[in-house]
Image: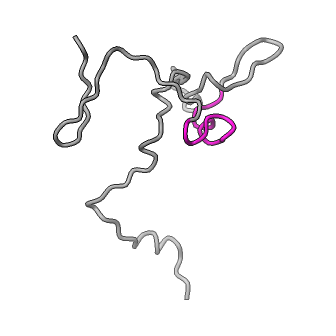
Amino acid sequence: MYKPIHFLIRNRKFSTEIFFIRNKELPVCSNCLHFIEYTNNNPFDGNRCKKFGEMDVITGVIKYDLAAVCRLGDDNCGKKGSHYTAKKTNSVDVVEGVDNRRFKCEKV
């Protein structure tokens, strides 16, 4: 009568010629000015966002929110990255090649 869900997922056919990447047009946190990359090897210490957090009123220590959590809720940055600010970079142009690959070219 009903087939188990793992049977349906296992037998699903996917096309190998066309690839769909979701959220490709959205801004990336690692390119944001407010992004803090984790510096140690602790797997529980993830990437953080300087824009959102909470300050301890006794010690004054600021605990920044995880970047992934900030992108989940619309109160913070949200999926669309509403508080995204691009990092200032050196003068670099992005040039598209013949096969639509993107290359960075520094101005001299």
Which quadrant is home to the C terminus?
top left
Residue lying furthest right: 58
* Left or right of 70, for residue 38: left
Q: Position of residue 3 (x, y in %)?
A: 52, 81
Q: Nearer the viewer, residue 71 or 11?
A: 71
Residue 23 higher or lower than 45, as above or below: below
Residue 54 higher or lower than 10, as above or below: above
Q: Residue at x 40, y 73 (%)?
A: 11
Q: Position of residue 59 (x, y in %)?
A: 79, 11
Q: Is 80 in the magenta?
A: yes
Q: Position of residue 26 (x, y in %)?
A: 47, 40
Residue lying furthest bottom: 1
Q: Quadrant of residue 80?
A: top right
Q: Is 52 in the magenta?
A: no
Specify the segment rendered in magenta.
65-81
Q: Quadrant of residue 69?
A: top right
* Left or right of 72, for residue 54: right
Q: Position of residue 95 (x, y in %)?
A: 24, 30
Which quadrant is home to the N terminus?
bottom right
Q: Residue at x 23, y 38 (%)?
A: 101
Count of picture labels:
0
Q: Nearer the viewer, residue 104 or 70?
A: 104
Residue lying furthest left: 98
* Left or right of 98, for residue 104: right
Q: How is the image coloured?
A: one colour
